[in-house]
Image (cartoon, grey):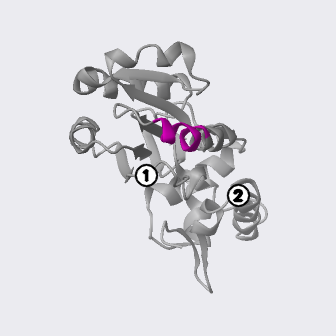
Amino acid sequence: MINVLLYTKNNTNKDKINETLDSKDFTLQVEKTFNNLPSRPEDTSIVILDITIKDESDYIPIKNIIKTANKYNINKFIILNPEQVNFLFESEIDFDEFVFCAQLEKELSIRIKLNLLKHNILPPKNSIVIDRLVLNLDKYELSINGKPVELTFKELELFKILLQNQNKVFTRNNLLSTVWEYDFYGGSRTVDVHIRRLRSKIPPPYNLMLKTIRNVGYMFSPQI
């Protein structure tokens, strides 16, 4: 799920954007004041700044939002009116894409998806996605927050089984027989070692979702 943070004072534009972005792929949070910085910037993929209502007093807060977005590598979109075109050349505000207000419904979704693909944020179809964790089942690659996580083949196999069966508890023997063979040297201790390695390589909060069920085994649960 791609988290989008929209700054707008324009309810019409807010409704257009809400209708344009597919709720299966995007979650939309709306801020009506430019003075509020992103509360959880590490969880935000896109910031949209609607400046169609020209208010010079907003330019300083906008720059602060852009500064935060740059710090966390958040993609920045600007919405403006055609008569504001000089803003693109004269302002000192940094942005990745711009869309004219009249083209919101036609262009916004396309521009966002192209931008996300360019930055490897939009997950491929054959993948398991949990917030900003993406396991690409075609390429057998794990990425979190758009950054690759290096795992061994067995670690990926183990993690894939747990991800595909969220909230289901697997015994050590279940996992051993699925990922390894029953007579694999090392027994159930091998599973414990690989779980420990996964937790050390996967950043929070996702490592906390790999849960130990005492005297039974392990499971992956998005509820921390």
Question: Is disc 2 surrounded by few (<14), some (14 to 19) or many (20+) residues within 10 Å?
Answer: many
Q: Identify the residue shown where x is 44% and y is 70%.
A: 167
In the rendered image, which quarter is residue 126 located in? top left
Majority secondary structure of magenta residues: helix
User: Residue 188 appears at what percent x and percent y?
Assistant: 70, 70
- Start-end of magenta stretch: 56-63
Element on which disc 2 rests: helix
Label ID, residue 50: none
User: Residue 41 appears at what percent x and percent y?
Assistant: 58, 51
Q: Is residue 27 above or below residue 123?
A: below
Residue type marked 2: Leu
Label ID, residue 33: 1
Q: Front-most of 158 and 20?
A: 20
Q: Is residue 62 magenta?
A: yes
Q: Front-most of 209 and 198?
A: 209
User: Residue 84 appears at what percent x and percent y?
Assistant: 39, 19
Q: How many marks?
A: 2
Q: Front-most of 110 and 150?
A: 110
Q: In this view, does 118 lie above or below 188?
A: above
Q: Identify the residue shown where x is 49% and y is 65%.
A: 222
| Residue at the disc numbered 2 | 198
